[in-house]
Image: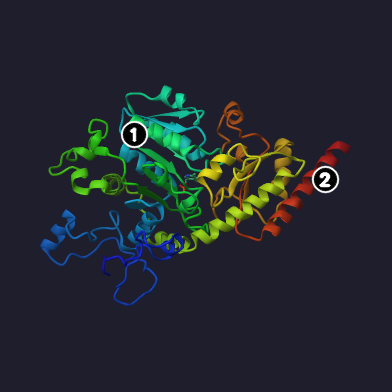
Amino acid sequence: MTSTPLPFGSEHFGFDTDQVHAGERIGDGYGARVTPIFLTAGFVFDSFDHARDRFAGHDGAWTYSRVGNPTNVVVEDRLTALEHGVGSLLVGSGQAAITVAMLGILKAGDHFLATQSLYEGTKTLFRENFVRFGIEVEFVDDPHDLAEWHRRLRPSTRAVFAESIPNPKNDLIDFDLVAGFARDAGVPFIVDSTAATPYLLRPLDHGASVVVHSASKFLSGHGASLAGVIVDGGTFEWARYPQKFPQFSAPLAGQEGDSMVTRFGRRAFIEYARTVIAARLGPVLSPVNAFLLLQGLETLSLRVERHSRTALAVAEWLEKQPEVESVDYPGLASSPHRALAERYLPRGAGSVFGFTLAGGIDDARTLIDSVELFSRMTHMGDVRSMILHPGTTSHAQVSAADRARFGIDDGLVRLSVGIEDEADLIADLDRAFAAVRASRVLAATV
Ligand SMILES: Cc1ncc(COP(=O)(O)O)c(C=O)c1O
């Protein structure tokens, strides 16, 4: 297979074309039109010198699949094009993407700031695992308060982390404000954009330095496999801060030669993440899962457009139900985040959101037990619609006081709206709400 990409992937094409063609290579020897699955641990060297050159990285080709694989590189290049980055790295899951990206930047003794409203798995990773590496996280309560960001800034602060559409509360950040703060503080801004996908929002166009995704969700789209990706924006000037980020400006520990910035320029971060972090810690993505991700990517815009349109209709319907206290969907005219959604999410406000039932946990239980089309699942961004009670599942280990503080009320129900018919989804919820009403009548009569 030639490693020369087709001209696709340049800025000359639109999103729909890039999602089908960017990064594709031809010439597998058999004329396969679809990217083949190169299921091989390693790659043959033609000669002694060939092996030496490949290890030196002189011919840009393959050595071993823990470092790079020809199936995976097509997906990486496609995601680079879709996110407007300079390079990408596939890893085994969204959690692996966050871990590898952050460990590429942070070391023991460093501190970083993150928004409070994040996927709970990320918060526990930062709070419980990173602290054991000597890396300290501090959560910012009000991401709109620039003074709070500055108040929490320390000489050891090395990164800012946020989600583009926070899971599950959808309380959007102001990218200009947070990116501006990170820029002034001289630290990279890392954004988990799982719930937005590059179709709805490209964080790199709004001042982010690095984007991560759980590609298990919308990017794959069909719920068959886990995957994660890191995309490097190539804009953060690592060499400007050699004391803060010596891994990019000095030769690697125990090695001779040029620094990552000298060797790779704007791609220094992603090359470091690939060769020094991911290849050594080992959370690589199987080419089989990369292939599944590629199948999903080819229809990303079509699915996400439909997901968002249907989610808005479901949110508007939910808002009218007397049993519903509030709906956390930023696309709603009534949402406090509507102005930010209009500014940053003009193509749609996503499709994973919560709503709160006034009747608390009893109503949540009846509703969730009564749906037939929605799947009771902890997952999101799948073509299938899903429903979950965060308070007793994803946030069960969070203290009651913190649940109350972060709006994870007993009546909170999270939906991931799929691509089924809008009328069928609303009918399913309507039946479940009827069951809630019936259970209330029953409770009032006993
Ligand atoms: C916003 C967000 N980031 C990261 C993850 C972790 O992704 P994965 O399950 O692929 O490890 C999730 C999982 O739900 C998520 O919602």
Q: Is residue 240 left or right of residue 163?
A: left
Per the rendering, the mark at residue 315 is: none
Mark 1: amino acid: Val
Identify the element where label 1 is drawn: loop
Q: Residue at x 28, y 54 (%)?
A: 67
Q: Residues within 10 Å of mark 2 (few under 14, many from 20)?
A: few
Residue, disc 1: 187
Q: Are marks 2 and 1 in contact (CB under 8 Å)?
A: no
Q: Nearer the viewer, residue 7 or 443?
A: 7
Residue that appears at 73% across and 36% down: 358
Going 15% across and 42% down the picture, which residue do you hit? 255
Residue 226 coordinates in the image, percent (x, y):
46, 53
Q: How far apart, in angstroms, are the residues tagged by discs 2 and 1?
A: 55 Å
- Amino acid carrying label 2: it is Ala
Q: Nearer the viewer, residue 76 or 347?
A: 347
Query: Residue 262 falls in which quadrant of the image?
Result: top left
Q: Which mark is residue 438?
A: 2
Query: Helix, strand, or loop for circle 2?
Result: helix
Q: Is mark 1 within 8 Å of ligand 1?
A: no
Q: In the visual, does 297 lie left or right of 55? A: right
State the image coordinates of residue 152 (x, y, percent, origin top left): 42, 24
| Residue 141 x %, y % | 51, 28
**Quarter of the rendering containing residue 336:** top right
> Of residues 76 and 315, which is closer to you in this image?
315
